[in-house]
Amino acid sequence: MKNISLPESVTFPGKPTPFGAECWFADACILDMDYFVKTIAGIKAKGVRPDLIGSIIAHYASKWLPDLSNDDMQRGLTNFEESPDSVTASWIKKRFFVETLVGILPPEKDSLPCNFLLRLLRTANMVNAEPSYREELEKRISWQLDQASLKELLIPSFSHTCGTLLDVELVSRLVKKFVHLDTEGAKSGAALVKVAKLVDCYLAEAAMDSNLSLSEFVSLAAVLPSHARAADDGLYRAIDTYLKAHPGVSKQERKSLCRLLDSRKLSPEASLHAAQNERLPVRAVIQVLFSEQTKLNKQLDWSGSFNGTRSPNIGLDPPAARCLSKREVNAQQMEIRKLREDVLRLQSQCNTMQMQIEKLVEKKKGFFRWKKLGIMPSVKGTLSVVERIEEGDREGDATFGRQTPMEMKTKLVRGRNTPNKWRKSMS
């Protein structure tokens, strides 16, 4: 492509009066699209800044296609609406115009405003431009989504297969791409917070559509990570709007909606409204009340630590001991009380074990005293004291315990003096 140099004063076809370079922004008069593309190529070859080239393209597009203008009442010198061609021919020209503009956009980021790109994408969806051009626009918008406005983000759904008025799937794709860029470190945390506020406002607008399904609402709200929202007031407003517009939502679906909320991030005004909201499930209301109680306790503790008992540290002197608050004193007393109870319980366990050991030692001493006297107990009685304890005081152990030394001695003497009955019968 031949590079075209722009002198300080040029004359374009159809414009007999020459004008300076500063007049370019005041009046775009190039009628031929091919000639405009060649002109932009020549400007790029001269090394003009990308933001200036983007301004030229945006101004030219708003002149010839009012859909791309900030002012809806603005009309160009000769736009497509005033053309005598048929509606089909007009749409074909619009499609060619949009696709040509996308093809000559500067490749540098932030060379064009995000709102202009959103209007260009809306027009591209309306005239059913090629998918490659629309994907290029979506990629560019995702880089600058934190600069978008809610008005330009409310792109209608031009697909007859979609039941919602707004193209919620398109916004979900844009937010997903932006979040992916944020995870790569290409965006700052402030940009993510702006996008979160924008998404909450968009959800509040889209929630009024009765055809918006719960899955679409939840998928768009859950795209952003939890740290993106500094406060959940906007999300709560969107959820409440959805519940108003969809009174037939089941109890389980209400619970799934409230899982998106973090009750700790609600402001006192939003918490008060949520506590009195009959559309919310009981569990969500209880969580809100518990969070508010926790916040109140923290505030009381924080204010209690600044009752005048603390003095600022001066110089490099070591800080003085801080006076404990009433809550801290109670906590320490509770810990001391628990420690005392643990010590008493351990002492009682030690006393019980000591008594059991003493009983075992006494039983062992009695057993060996019998053995020294030459009196052997029955076979069942020869078991050790430990084995008898493990057997759980069986019948043999009970018998052994009931025999006294005199009874056992008498039994043994009788056994020696009495002859065996069966010996005579064997002789």
Image: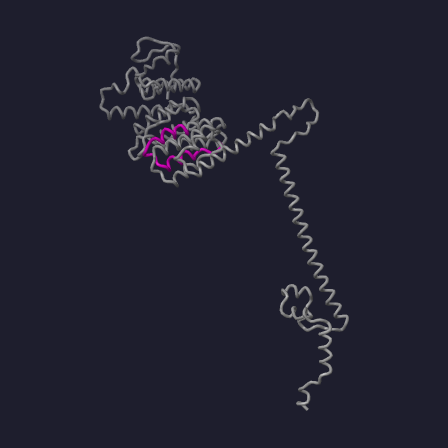
Q: Can residue 406 be found in the magenta stretch?
A: no
Query: At which x and y percent is residue 406?
Result: 73, 73
Quadrant where the C terminus sits is bottom right
The reply, left or right, for residue 57 in relation to residue 360 is: left
Residue nearest the viewer, comparing 413 with 208:
413
Q: Is residue 103 visible?
A: no
Highlighted magenta segment, given as a residue range: 199-227
**Residue 162 x/y as whole percent:** 31, 34
Q: Is residue 425 above or below residue 271?
A: below
Quarter holding residue 324: top right
Residue at 66% of width from left, 66% of height from top? Answer: 388
Way the structure is coloured: one colour
Q: Residue at x 49, y 35 (%)?
A: 290
Is 277 or 19 nearer to us in this picture? 277
Q: Along the line of sight, which residue is nearer the eye, 3 or 324? A: 324
Does the magenta stretch mainly form a helix, a strand or a loop? helix
Please say whether residue 201 is one of the residues in the magenta stretch: yes
Image position of 322 with respect to 10: above or below? below
Residue 151 percent location from the top left of the image: 37, 24
Give x and y (percent) for residue 74.
31, 16
- Residue 95: name its quadrant: top left
Which residue occupies the foreground of this view, 100 or 201? 201
Residue found at x 69% / y 22%: 315
Considering every residue shown, the one lying at the far bottom of the view is 427
